[in-house]
Each structure stands twice: as C-alpha cells, then as structure tokens.
Amino acid sequence: MIVIVDYGMGNLGSILNMLKKIGVTGAKISSSPDEVEQADKLILPGVGAFDTGMKRLAETGLLEVLNEKVLKSKTPTLGVCLGMQLITKSSEEGQLPGLGWIDARTIRFQFDPRQTGLKIPHMGWNFIEFQREGALLMDMYPGSRFYFVHSYHVVCGNAADVLATTNYGYDFVSIVQHENIMGVQFHPEKSHKFGMRIYKNFVENT
Amino acid sequence: MLTKRVISCLDVRDGKLAKSIKFVDTKDIGDPVERARKYYQEGLDELVFYDITASSDRRDIMIDVVSEVASQVFIPFSVGGGLRTVEDCSRVLLAGAEKVNVNSAAVKNPGLISEASRAFGAQAVVLSMDVLRVGPGPEIPSGYEIVINGGRTPMGIDAVAWARRGEDLGAGELVVNSIDADGTREGYEITLTRMIADAVRIPVIASGGGGTPGHMFEVLTEGRADAALIASMLHYGEYTIAEIKSYLSNRGLPIRKAGMPVT
C-alpha cells in the first residue's frame, strides 16, 4: 500500500488521481499512524509554508512513526515540493527544524529579482538535468519538463545525493535521493506524462 | 530555463461550455471536461475555467466539473468566476484546482486576496484584472484604469497601482486583461502588459486580443509577459497547440514543446 501522508497541506487529491491514472490501485490518503505504519511506500506532499508544515506534521502525531518508517524500516519515501524541503534539516523560510532525513538545508533563491529580471516564485514549466542515475529517472529522456511553483530550494551537503538539477538563475537541486529517501521540487502530478513517469518509477522501481 | 506558458481559458455556464467555444466533434459537444482533456493531450501548459453561471444556486455544478477535470487532466488549472469568499475559494481548491482566480470581488474587498493567500499560499491565488485605456489623469497616472462588471463599471483605480497592491496583498500571479483588446483579435495590449510586468515581481499573464501566434510572440517578448492567454484562436480550431508552440519555439522562445500525444 502506498500512503499519501495527509497533514493538511496541499492538493493530495491530484497525487491520488495520477496514481490511479498509472494503474496504482492500493494508494490511500491518510493521516493515521497505523496506516502509515503499514505502508510499503510513502509520499509526503505539501504546498505552503515550512513552519506550518512542520507544525501540522507534529500535531497529526505522525512524526514518530514517520521517522521509524523512513530511517529504520527504510521505506521508500518521496517528498514532493514542500515535502522535499521538509525532509531537509532546516529552511530559511522558517525557524522550526526540518525532519532532517537527508544532509541538506532549504534556502531562498539567491538572486535579486529586480536585477536579474527573474521572478520569485519560480512558477511554470522547466527542465531537469540528470546528475547521476537513479530509479526515479529510469526511461526518462533528456528534455523532460516539469511544473514548478516555489520560492525556496534544497541545497545538499552531499553532492552524491543530487539526482537532477534545474536552472533558474543558477542550477538548483530539483531531484534528490539518499538511499530510500527521495524528493522532487516540482509537482509530478501536474507535469503531464513526465510526471507520470516519475510516479511510475517510484511505484515500480524503488 | 523557465518556459513561457501557453494558457487557454474556457467559459463554463451551468456546467457546459459557453457559446464562445466552437464544438469540434460530437464527443466534445459542450463538455468542458472533454475539451480540457483534448487540450491537455495536445500539450497545453495550463487551463483557466471561468464560471459564468448567472445564478449562484447552480454553482455546485462547477465543483463537479472541477473534480472531473482534476481526475483526468494532469496540468495546472485555475478556476474563477463568482468567488467572493475564502470559503468559495476553498471549495474549488479542494475539488482539485491548483489556483483560484479572483477579480471583481477582490477589487471590492482587497482583503480577499490576503486572506486567500494566507490560507492557501500565494501560488494558489491569481489576481485577474480587467483594464480599460482611459489616458493619463491625476487619479490614473498610467492611463489604464481598473474596471469591473465585464468592463462596465470604472473603479477610479490605476491599473499599475492595483497590480502592485495585489502583489503586496499576496497574489502569486496576475492576469492582465485588456478590455480594449478583448475580442478584437488584433493583438494584446503591449504597453499595458509591459508596464505591469515591469512594476511587479510576480508572473504576469497577458489576456485579451490574441488572434495569432505572432501576437503571442509579441506580448511574450516586447510585452514581457510570462504567459499568454488564448481563447478563440484555439477554440475555433484556427490553430493547434502544436502549431502555436512550434511558432514560438522556432523564434527562440523557451517553450514546453507539444510533443507526443498522451492518453
């Protein structure tokens, strides 16, 4: 069973819709620690502010079981958008510590929109550059494009964790993977066939 | 590199496509979900649905349309028309839309923008503005004025000032719709679009007047828009999304290519 973790942040229905579209039958949106405990795979979605996300995760009472599943049971886990940022140690967007599952932190885009003419949030369709091989990238061809909406991005402490980067002002990490823990900065569920490929890979190959 | 977006809007009345849209095949007759699916499969980047249902007790039909679109169309889409409160916005977002589009209600009650932005995040709040060219004056230094009620009611608010205010209140994107250009199909209002794109740091979607891919190119370059909204040139089958995208791409704009069909 794949559990889409419901902690009150983001458009969970669209992830479930896409999983159904690619033929996944056992997926479930849940905030129950028991169901998270039983999950074969976890998706941590999220739209919104970092501290609100961490607060809600704590309030839902899921932190303990999530840490157990991800760090001890090594359950394949995919963080999406804010979900990718929450798995880092910290964010410039908030004061609360992150989940700290990967050696990374989250920072704001480091350019001045007035000088560069680049707008924040980074919103729209952009490309990814593969940095190394990984399950999420199987059968993905160069030129794949994804829908992004974000003002902050992840910086990895360990370069080997960077699966793909995207250029917006400079190259930032758009897909991260450390062992069973993965994150994508874009919204695969809104990224057409390219996004379907990401979820298919997560479901079938991790 | 971030690509320029091609966005189309569909007017929906009582759950059916409005007459401004030509029905291409029998399967398509009046069904917004079928039309959205077709555009999605052809490579459109994003969709906007405007609910032009007159009576508010029939608005629930729109929620069903939104849920249906969300289960079949895997690109971002926003919903506007008749959203007056945060609760109205919440219903369309929960039904599966990425963004809400607020217009007249936000002019009358700017607090709607900030409340919605706090509740759902700036990325979910699109401020749509209808703008009329009136010439510069003391109240309207830019020469462009905000109007509501489909262009009939001038509000005495400068369009550039309103765009800045919308950004400050927490809108994540702006749709700049020129009432003068709307329906002419003679090109977007370049001066207006550029003025607003230069005044704010959030993405600007140009709307009104698009009749050819050349018009779109113009507003995405000279007009400095991040996205171009199109309606009849697509709805009447005059251009396909692939034609539009290859035109823009061949002229050097970063574009998400239409590519292979998907199911």
Image (cartoon, coloured by chain):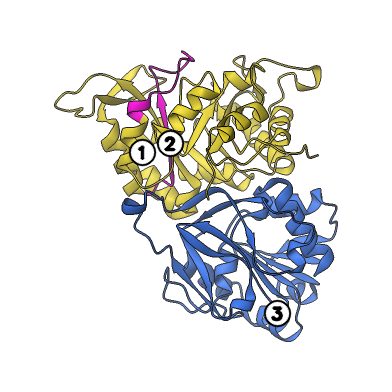
Chain colours: A blue, B yellow
Query: What is the C-alpha distance between the residues marked 3 and 1?
Result: 44 Å
Contact check, label 1 and label 2, Cβ < 8 Å:
yes
Mark with earlier residue (1, 2): 1
Q: Is residue A119 above or below residue A171?
A: above
Asked if the magenta segment contains residue B190, the reply would be: yes
Q: Tell me the number on the disc at residue B225.
A: 2
Whether discs 3 and 2 lie on one chain: the answer is no
Badge 2: residue crowd in 10 Å (few <14, some 14–19, many ≥20) = many
Chain letter for the residue marked with disc 2 in the picture: B
The answer to whether residue B227 is seen in the rendering is yes
| Residue drawn at (71%, 33%) of the image | B42
Asked if B112 appears above or below A200 in the picture, the reply is above
* Label 1 SS: helix
Label 1 Cα neighbours within 10 Å, binned few <14 / some 14-19 / many ≥20: many
Residue behind mark 1: B197
Name the chain under label 3: A
- Magenta range is B170-192
What residue do we see at 69% from left, 84% from top? A71
| Secondary structure under the numbered disc 3 in the rendered image | helix
Residue B60: give x, y in percent of width and height. Answer: 63, 33
**Front residue (pair B168, B256):** B256
Residue B6 vertical placement versus A53 (above, below)? above
* Disc ID at residue A70: 3
Q: Main secondary structure of the magenta part?
A: loop
Q: Is residue B109 visible?
A: no
Identity, as a three-letter code, of the amino acid under mark 2: Ala
